[in-house]
Image (cartoon, rainbow, N blue to C red):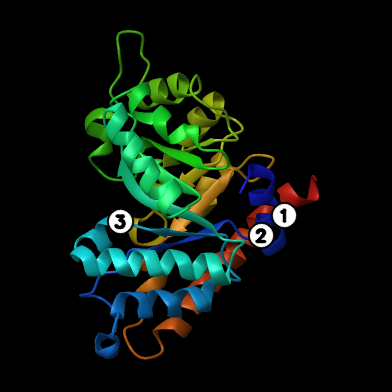
Amino acid sequence: MDKQQLFENIKRKKSFLCVGLDTDIKKIPGHLLKEEDPIFAFNKAIIDATADLCIAYKPNLAFYESMGVKGWIAFEKTVKYIKDNYPDQFIIADAKRGDIGNTSAMYARTFFEELDIDSVTVAPYMGEDSVTPFLTYDNKWVILLALTSNKGSHDFQLTEDANGERLFEKVLRKSQEWANDDRMMYVVGATQGRAFEDIRKIVPDHFLLVPGIGAQGGSLEEVCKYGMNSTCGLIVNSSRGIIYVDKTEKFAEAARTAAQEVQAQMAEQLKRVINNQ
């Protein structure tokens, strides 16, 4: 999926919502544990309930890897189900990979050849040769960690060098030598608020993957105010605030209601972008 196709989906659905499939076997409704594959059964129900309201799904690999082979099977089945039934969805493998070149090449092969996923999150802190193997695939996206939503982001990402440049700013500037806004996105946490202004000065045209609204306390309105650009430029993720709002047999209906509430807010925020087209 290219940048224009992504924007067309956003306009058509009046949404830039990404539903995070952070599926924990210990948190899904108890009745699903009777299923042959409880994780996939949960994901399938969530996907069916929300697919018309979102433009992306983001399975977090940690939740699947924690279950070993069974988790990987559920992950692969989830990806295949989305691709077969909702091919307009942008799929993000939230894997946070990044290693020396030959290892990164194997990670890239896993997600882009074996699984044919649209994008993968990558940690850039080992430098160019740890990222470029992911950029050898046409029509695939690399989503670099830039400024994350967790409290610990202050430990390193906001530290300044002698010239006053913060580490996340260095990542944004340097990485643009590797790929343009048709191949690369950045993770910026919703809790970072006004920092979106500084980020847009460096990467005005890139899409930003924004976790941290809802359960983590980020403000959608603030993210849009400082981070939205002429092609929206945002993919805002919500995980717990959608998939775990109910633990009864009506969990999928409740997830849909939660997604509808977010989508309605997004539709309002998108008016100025769509009206300017």
Q: Quadrant of residue 96?
A: top left
Of the image marks 2 and 3, the number of the one nearer the N terminus = 3
Depth check: give the residue in front, 245 or 145. 145
Q: Nearer the viewer, residue 231 or 81?
A: 81
The amino acid type of the residue labelled 3 equals Leu
Q: Which residue is mark 3?
A: 61
Nearest to the observer: residue 240 or residue 265: 240
Q: Which residue is mark 2?
A: 268
For the residues bearing labels 1 and 2, Cβ distance under 8 angstroms: yes
Q: CB under 8 Å between callouts 2 and 3?
A: no
Dot 1 alpha-carbon crowd within 10 angstroms: few under 14, some 14 to 19, many 20 or more = few
What is the C-alpha distance between the residues marked 1 and 3? 34 Å
Given the image, on which type of amino acid does mark 1 rest?
Lys
Q: Nearer the viewer, residue 229 or 269?
A: 229
Assess disc 3: are there few (<14), some (14-19) or many (≥20) residues with their C-alpha within 10 Å of its C-alpha: some
Nearest-to-viewer mark from 2 and 3: 3
Furthest residue in direction top, as rendered: 162
Is 136 above or below relative to 30?
above
Mark 2–mark 3 Cα distance, whole angstroms, equals 32 Å
Q: Secondary structure at mark 2?
A: helix
Can residue 211 be seen here? The reply is no
Residue occupying image coordinates x 50% and y 19% = 177
Identify the residue under disc 1. Answer: 271
**Dot placed on the residue nearer the N-terminal end, 1 or 3:** 3
Above or below — where is 57 with respect to 6?
below
Distance between the alpha carbons at the discs numbered 1 and 2: 6 Å
The numbered dot on residue 256 is none
Q: Residues within 10 Å of mark 2 (few under 14, many from 20)?
A: few
Res 217 seen here: yes
Q: x, y percentage for residue 77?
A: 39, 69
Looking at the rendered image, the quarter that the C terminus falls into is: top right
